[in-house]
Amino acid sequence: MTTEKNEVLISVRGLEKHFKGGELKALRGVDADICRGEVVVVIGPSGSGKSTFLRCLNLLEQPTAGTISLAGVDITDPTVDINLHRQKMGMVFQHFNLFPHMTVLRNMTIAPIKLLKKSREEAEAKARSLLERVNLEDREDAYPSQLSGGQKQRIAIVRALCMEPEVMLFDEPTSALDPEMVGEVLDVMKELALSGMTMICVTHEMGFAREVADRVLFMDEGKIVEEGTPEEIFSSQKEQRTKDFLNKVL
Amino acid sequence: MSIFEQWWLPIAELVENRQPLNFFQNLYKEIYMNAIKDDRWLLYLDGLWVTLKVSFFAILAGTLLGTVLAVLRLPSVTDYRYRGNHPLKKLGFGVLRFFCWFAKFYIDLIRGTPLLLQVLIINFGVFGSIRIDKVIIGVIACALNSAAYVAEIVRGGIMSVDPGQTEAGRSLGFSGLATMLWIVLPQAAKSALPSLCNEFIALIKETSILSYIALTELTKAGDYIRSRTYSAFTPYIISGMLYLLLTLILTTLIRKLERRLRASDH
Ligand SMILES: Nc1ncnc2c1ncn2[C@@H]1O[C@H](COP(=O)(O)OP(=O)(O)OP(=O)(O)O)[C@@H](O)[C@H]1O
Ligand SMILES: [Mg+2]
């Protein structure tokens, strides 16, 4: 990887998220530092708070307590313009969430045109070059309903990339896909990781984690129970809970 | 002398001599008396023009206002669908609660009282002492009324849009309002269009109530001609056919629009 790795891009301190008026504690104090260019994979059992953690990072969930700073700016401070900061954090959803009433090209260009004030030509040129990168250059006029799941998710990834984000958040991007389409999406993510993008991925694809992650976070019951290199997590876990989880999924 | 007058002459003579008329002569007599004599057809056209004007602007204003009401009336900030991402969150919790309450109150009030009463109140109460074009009063009354119905239709449309769409919009950096405008409302409009079409047709027909405040729209025009010719059917039927024409044109336009919006789902 080419990028320098020690500059902290996202710093999370004491992050808590409660639902149902405090009855349900989805996150119970999460601390994490994510460096620029780093690929972090988050794993853990269902309901452990992985999605909640990811969604708190760009404030799709309002944290109950704790701070999140992006490049030194505390984005949980109500006075910061969260919309500006969200532009720097691309997000890819399990269910793609492409805009069904727009063509692929429009899906990719609407945000750069309206938010980054790019000209149509500039935005479309960028979108086309990204479409080429994921081998979908011939689908720019298609509507999402005309695409396969794997194609949709590749489009969702490049739609986020059109905003030139500093970090990409993935929430189980392959979980809603037919098995034969998982590979094409993972390939795009691998390529993105190699290009030096900072990535935080929640996934059940342990192979991807092993191969691509710089660091793996294991979450359980709203906390990061263990973290380390893929080697450490998959081969020499220290925590019993990590062992139990991996025994079940591997 | 126009061709219509020439056709009329022999029938006029029969009428003069109290001779019986056959079916076609009778029909022509009705048409002649109620539409041709003294250029009466112009009265229908004037009425049609007024109805068209009132309907057009009332549909426009009612849809805009109704959409605003629908957004104001969305589930509260804490609703699970928005997870703290309510499109108007910036206004603050208290203000939003008030708006939501107000929108509900307005919708219940308007839907629960007769349009005729609303028209009378606006005409004699609100604008009683101000000289103002009756067309404007008609537009205001019909728009305020239609907005309440449109609000519920559009709200249904908004609720039918997957919350993931809002999340995707917000995650790209769109503000709550921009997400609503560019991403949610276009999809909501698509599913709400058939019901909206119903509402617009109802509005066109309900403008006939404005004849109560002496606005010479299509119904009033027919009624006026009846008062001159004492034909009990023909003037109303002519007015009715013109309403039908308006609503059919509207229906056709909306069906076209629906077909265009369907282009995205195959
Ligand atoms: N909007 C919400 N309202 C109430 N409870 C919620 C909400 N979102 C998440 N939760 C709860 O918080 C806990 C953590 O959920 P989360 O979705 O973060 O888990 P996860 O690790 O992503 O699980 P999965 O692997 O199934 O996606 C769960 O118990 C879930 O039911
Ligand atoms: Mg999840």
Image (cartoon, coloured by chain):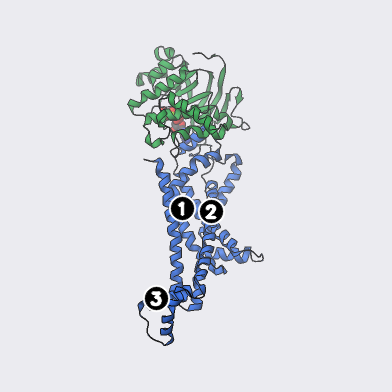
Point 58% across, 26% down: residue: A67
> Where does label 2 land, which residue?
B60
Q: Single out the residue that lies furthest toward the front.
A: B1
Specify the amino acid type for callout 2.
Leu
Specify the amino acid type for callout 3.
Leu
In the structure shown, which secondary structural element does the residue marked by tag 3 occupy? helix
Q: Single out the residue that lies furthest toward the left.
A: A180
Residue contact between numbered discs 3 and 2, judged by CB atoms under 8 Å: no
Q: Residue A83 bears which disc, if any?
A: none
Q: Residue B196 bears which disc, if any?
A: 1
Q: Earlier in the sequence, mark 3 or mark 2?
A: 3
Rendered shade, chain A:
green
> Where does label 3 land, which residue?
B27
Chain letter for mark 1: B
Task: Please provide percent x and percent y for residue A139.
Answer: 40, 31
Left or right side of B59 for B248:
left
Task: Please provide percent x and percent y for residue B66.
Answer: 53, 51
For discs 2 and 1, the disc positioned in front in the rendered view: 2
Closest to the observer, B166 or B28: B28
Which corner quadrant of the image does residue B128 belong to?
A: bottom right
| Quadrant where the image shows the C terminus of chain A | top left
In the structure shown, which secondary structural element does the residue marked by tag 1 occupy? helix
Label 2 neighbourhood size at 10 Å, few (<14), some (14-19), many (20+)? some
On screen, residue A132 above or below B35: above
In the structure shown, which secondary structural element does the residue marked by tag 2 occupy? helix
For discs 3 and 2, the disc positioned in front in the rendered view: 3
Q: Label 3 vs label 2: CA separation? A: 39 Å
Residue contact between numbered discs 3 and 1, judged by CB atoms under 8 Å: no
